[in-house]
Amino acid sequence: MIQSPADDLLPMAETIVLTAAELSSMLGIDRKTLYAAASRGEVPCVRIGRRVLFPRETIEKWLTASSTTPPAPAPHSQAKPWQTCSAKARR
């Protein structure tokens, strides 16, 4: 049986890198937002020529390290929950 080069490719779940389209879809953000974050060094990536790729294992570690529990609200806060930051700044 003759194998085609496509038979040697790993399925998507096992690929070692993600494209910007794949990662932005997984994160639920726009692809342009992902590219901008990668260019600022906020998201780990590998650039090969003009292609920007995201190593799956590095992204998984980055997400685990980046995830934190939200801080508890400060007791006796004077800000009302419906006030926006701009409303606080006007005082």
Image: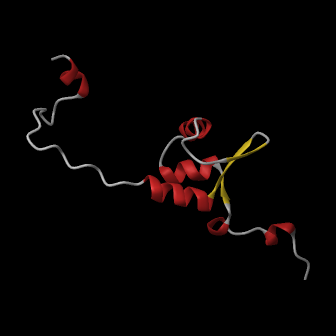
Nearer-the-camera pick, 47 or 31: 47
Q: In which quadrant will I find the C terminus?
A: top left
Nearer-the-camera pick, 31 or 54: 54
The quarter of the displayed image where residue 87 is located: top left
Q: Which residue is painted at 18% across and 45% down in the image?
A: 73
Q: x, y (%) of residue 4?
A: 87, 70
- Looking at the image, the residue that sits furthest to the bottom is 1
The quarter of the displayed image where residue 42 is located: top right
Q: x, y (%) of residue 84?
A: 22, 28
Q: In which quadrant will I find the N terminus?
A: bottom right
Visual colour scheme? secondary structure
Q: Which residue is painted at 15% across and 37% down in the image?
A: 81
23 on left or right of 82:
right
Q: How many marks?
A: 0
Q: x, y (%) of residue 67?
A: 41, 54
- Looking at the image, the residue that sits furthest to the top is 90
Q: x, y (%) of residue 48?
A: 77, 46
The quarter of the displayed image where residue 77 is located: top left
Nearer-the-camera pick, 78 or 16: 78
Q: Which residue is painted at 86% across and 67% down in the image?
A: 5
Q: Which residue is painted at 10% across and 33% down in the image?
A: 78
38 on left or right of 65:
right
Q: Using the image, determine if residue 2 lies above or below residue 23.
A: below
Q: Using the image, determine if residue 35 lies above or below residue 13.
A: above
23 on left or right of 71:
right
